Image (cartoon, rainbow, N blue to C red):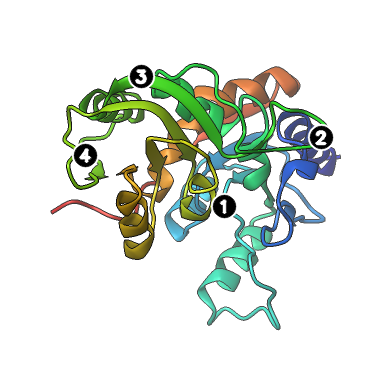
Amino acid sequence: MATIDFDHVVKAMGHIAPLKLADTTWDNVGIMVETPALKPSKKVLLTIDFTEAVLTEAIEHDASIIVAYHPPIFRPFKCLKLADHKAMLLLTALANNMSIYCPHSALDSVEDGINDWIVKGLGGKPGVPIQPTDDNPREGVGRIAEVNVAVSELVKRAKKFMEIDDVRVALPYGKTMDSMVHSVSVCAGSGGSVVRLAKKADAYFTGEMSHHEVLAATAEGITVILSEHTRTERGYLSAKLKPKLESQLPPDFTILVSEMDGCPLRTC
């Protein structure tokens, strides 16, 4: 039965990013949508965001399963109506016999997850969680890592491994792009509430922070580097998640990475 295909993916994702690592006090992870009539294509589409463009792409590629890093269902629905854009996307997925799974913060916290991938991309020594779990000191929220480079070099590394043209940098008073960064606090996505938990970090690296979070950091002498929310996450899909899933799933599965998924913001 085709529904067994979804069971395979759910089990594989559970090995890659155990859901016990997710912070369910605010997050929503796991099975988002499960159709009773999954199409038998054995095609899995990986995406950061579940958007209309991604859904159209999934239909065109005859995908049966979507693994969306961000949860398509974050707040509860009182009803499912086509007039509601998010509900429409979910209903259309069901109408096309697709199921959807979301790992979100579990994939951030797991060892060799998104935050460890960022640390490696920045050229840092193996990072340690800012808030480790009780079970494994290598897993947990955020990362802090030793880098020992100038701000300019850290920016250069970030742009190279994320394959982007620009980042935003906030320098504390008296510091320059030549100032040294010995340790960096890292969190994928919107990490303002996480990176500041690290003690003795010279720099914060995350996707986005509020204006006042940035001001508070620079007032404390901490450099802030922001690359936009999903830029901290998207490269992981091809670099890590795709090969991990391929090694976990039967060989007749095809893993695709969305080409329509992208940062919604543009520099003009």
Viewer-closest of 195 and 208: 195
The correct choice, above or below, for 82 with respect to 99 in the image is: below
| Horizontal arrangement in the rendering, residue 253 relative to residue 157 (left or right) | right
Q: Nearer the viewer, mark 2 or mark 3?
A: 3
Taking depth in this image into account, of 213 and 19 the one nearest to the observer is 213
Quadrant for the N terminus, please. Answer: top right
Give me the C-alpha separation between circle 4 and circle 3: 21 Å
Of pointers 1 and 2, the one earlier in the residue sequence: 2
Q: Are the residues tagged 1 and 4 within 8 Å (C-beta)?
A: no
For the residue marked with disc 4, what is the amino acid? Answer: Asp
Q: As shown in the figure, which amino acid type bears the numbered disc 3? A: Asn
Quadrant of residue 7 within the rendered picture: top right
Q: Mark 1 points at which residue?
A: 70
Is 97 on the left or on the right of 267, as rendered?
Answer: right
Residue 225 picture location, percent across and down: 31, 41
Q: Are marks 4 and 3 in contact (CB under 8 Å)?
A: no
The residue that disc 3 covers is: 148
The earlier-in-sequence mark between 4 and 2 is 2
